[in-house]
Image (tube, rainbow, N blue to C red):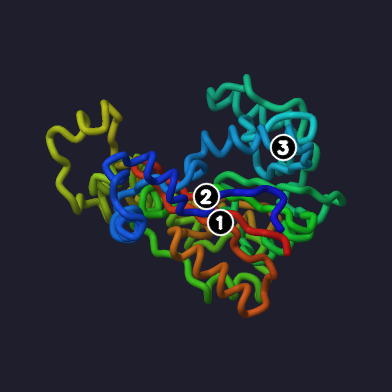
Amino acid sequence: MAVINFSPEFDLDYYRKSYPELNNLPDEVVKEHYKRFAVEQGHSTCFYDRREYLQLFLQNIIDKERLKALEIGCGGSPFLRGKRIKYFETVPVDDLKEHYIKVGRSTDHFPKKFDFVSPTGDLGIIDETFDVVLSCHVIEHCPDFIEHLQNVNRLLKKGGLYILIVPDKRYCFDHYNSDSTLTEVIDAFVNERKTARLADVISTIYTRTHNSAVLHWLGEHGKRFGYRTTPLEPDAKAKVMGEYFFDDGQGVNPEQFLKLIEKYAESLEKGEYLSAHNWRFTPDSFRYIVDMLNKLGFINFPLHRLCHTIWRRLEFIAMLEKV
């Protein structure tokens, strides 16, 4: 039994309250409405499918039940706080603060320290167990998806949950990059990949598009290969309440492109980690890959809950349970 009692991914009572026009309809009709429209239109289907509500609930339940939690990759703005929360990062807190100051980012919300630090992201340095492990926009950066899940599983007590906030590639800068596949995930594990593929490093920089979730939901995905593939409507900015739109794909500058390849070769030689999106998921592809990895015996870490991406957002929430 999971340490935290979350309602189902589709909470009928919550759905009715969120969409009052459904209140007088029979349950079966409401369920059919959910199947036909909720995912495609980004309807909220449970109280925890938005990060701010999940954050409040988790913080309260951890404090109330005195649960022990680990946050992976919190950076300068932890999702969870308190005496029962520990943090894992790839650099010491002072080094990351220095980087934030250099690039003009605020350091006001940094924790006092990172409890565990590994330059290579090795969770094996942790010799404690937890009720909850959480990561926010981390798993897509892990070169070996399976190894990461195995390591997190080891850190959890029975019934413990790994809660992930994962970018949905359809609504972020990865829109034009291909979905990750089960075979790629298995290949990375069998070959013990420790760093990003060159293809992923290049695509993270050169084939990216804009990162405005609202515009992606509206069907405006920006340029691809230097050309716009969808019309940017004159009032698109008004539709997104003044949100600024730009096509931030790099375009191919031959000199910069070759320098990137050189940098990649140097990182391999030195054994350094080069940040990139190694994996690109939708909620459906994430569910399929995790389910298949469990069936094939690569992990024993079933999905507990998975919430689809909701309107105006670019991320979904998944939970895996230690059984």
Q: Position of residue 164 (x, y in %)?
A: 59, 50
Amino acid type of the residue tagged 3 in the rendering: Ile
Amino acid type of the residue tagged 1 in the rendering: Arg
Q: Is residue 81 visible?
A: yes
Is 160 on the left or on the right of 27, as rendered? right
* Cα distance in 3D space between marks 3 and 1: 18 Å
Q: What is the number of the mark on residue 317? A: 2
Q: Between disc 2 and disc 1, whose residue precedes?
A: 1
Q: Residue at x 52, y 56 (%)?
A: 306
* Cα distance in 3D space between marks 2 and 1: 8 Å
Under circle 3, the secondary element is helix
Marker count (numbered): 3
Under circle 2, the secondary element is strand
Q: Residues within 10 Å of mark 1 (few under 14, many from 20)?
A: some
Identify the residue at the far left of this view. Answer: 234
Q: Position of residue 221 (x, y in %)?
A: 27, 48
Is 278 on the left or on the right of 211, as rendered? right
Amino acid type of the residue tagged 2 in the rendering: Ile
* Cα distance in 3D space between marks 2 and 3: 18 Å
| Frontmost residue, 235 versus 201 | 235
Q: Position of residue 88 (x, y in %)?
A: 73, 42
Q: Residue at x 27, y 56 (%)?
A: 225
Is 126 on the left or on the right of 236, as rendered? right
Image quadrant for the C terminus? bottom right
Q: Between disc 3 and disc 1, whose residue precedes?
A: 3
Residue located beneath label 1 in the image: 305
Residue located beneath label 3 in the image: 62
Identify the residue at the far bottom of this view. Answer: 296
In front: mark 2 or mark 1?
1
Are discs 2 and 1 less than 8 Å apart at CB?
yes
